[in-house]
Each structure stands twice: as structure tokens, then as C-alpha cells.
Amino acid sequence: MRNTASKAIKCLLVMIILLSLSADMKNSKGENIVNSATLNDEWNRTFGGGDDDWAYFVQQTNDGGYVLVGLTQSFGAGNDDVWLIKTDANGNEIWSKTFGGSKGERGYCVRQTNDGGYIIAGYTMSFGAGGYDAWLIKTDANGNEIWNKTFGKERTDWGYSIQQTSDGGYIIAGYTMSFGAGKNDIC
């Protein structure tokens, strides 16, 4: 499955490159809307090791840098681990942290919190009630874990999005098979 996903990503990248090399893009009136000769990267960076490493979400931080979350198979404690990377405004890595156990974990969303730290939503197989459990991880401004919470039962429960609420709490969106009316339900 990983090999299939890797091939799909490579195929998508080839298509993007081919499209960028094609003629200027035009709107429905035939007017140029993008001149491919004027598209230049301000910068780009890659992060990773010898295995698969994926980023699922990026957010600009209050200091003008960026924070990315995803998974790493190259670093960490086990199979897939949540990977949090903080960069400066030019995309240079300031620090990176991994979170997880001997089984699989993924981080799907990260947000900077009012205290300058970060909150991550994803799933864990190493901790919680069993199977896949939605997982929240709260860190300080340097990515050090302050606490983590799991939500779910013996079936599959994932967290895909997280937001800090006006009262200082957090709201998470995802799906559950442990609760609700049937198979996959929004939670």
C-alpha cells in the first residue's frame, strides 16, 4: 500500500511539472492568467530520512516561520510516528520532534495555541483503548510534550482537525466507528 501511495505521489509530481512546462494558462475568455515563466519558488525545503516521511498539514506561526505535522518512518520510536517540524521564515528547520510508541501513529493537523505552543490531532495505535484512537498532543513552544489524550474505544477513531476554542479548550473533528449510528460516523 505504501508503494502504491509513493507511486501515486510521484505520478502527481510529474503531472505538476509537465503542466508547469506547458503553455501559459488561460481563462474561459482565452486571456493569460498565469505565465509559467513568472512562477518562481521563493524557497523550498525537504525533510526526511531513508524511509517514508509525510507532511499532512502546515501552518504559518506567529514568528513568521512554519510548523508542519505528519508522520515519519525514518525517525522515532516505532512503525509510524507523529512528526512535528518547526522552521524559520525561510523554511530552515529549527527543531523537530516525534511522538509515538511501537505501533503506528499519525498527525493530521497542528495549530499554534494562545500560549505559543502547539496542539496536534491524529491517531495512535500504541496508546488508548485499542485499535486506532483519536489522539491529541499538546506541546510547549519548543515542541516538548506537555500532555496527550486519547479518545475512542476498541474500534477505529481518528482526529483530522483541531482548533483552540475561545474558552482556551480544544475542539477536534474526525470520525468514529466506536460510537454513533453505524460504520464511519463524523465526530
Image (cartoon, rainbow, N blue to C red):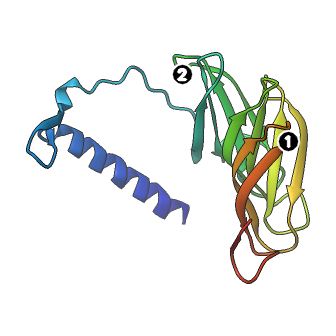
Q: Is residue 89 above or below residue 123?
A: above
x then y, percent, for residue 20: 23, 39
From the image, state whether disc 1 or disc 2 is nearer to you.
1
Within-10-Å neighbours for mark 1: few <14, some 14–19, many 20+: few
If the image is split into quadrants, where does the N terminus sit?
Answer: bottom right
x then y, percent, for residue 139: 83, 32
Q: Nearer the viewer, residue 13 or 67?
A: 67
Q: Secondary structure at mark 1?
A: loop
Asked whether residue 12 is in view, the answer is: yes
Q: Is residue 48 above or below residue 66?
A: below
- Amino acid type at image mark 1: Gly
Name the residue at 72% across, 46% down.
162
Q: Which residue is mark 2?
A: 91
Within-10-Å neighbours for mark 2: few <14, some 14–19, many 20+: some
Q: Which residue is mark 1?
A: 169
Name the residue at 73% across, 83% down.
182
Q: Secondary structure at mark 2?
A: loop
User: Image quadrant of residue 65?
Assistant: top right
Q: Nearer the viewer, residue 166 or 155?
A: 166
- Label annotation for residue 133: none
x then y, percent, for residue 22: 15, 42
Name the residue at 49% across, 27% down.
45
Q: Is residue 185 above or below residue 36?
A: below
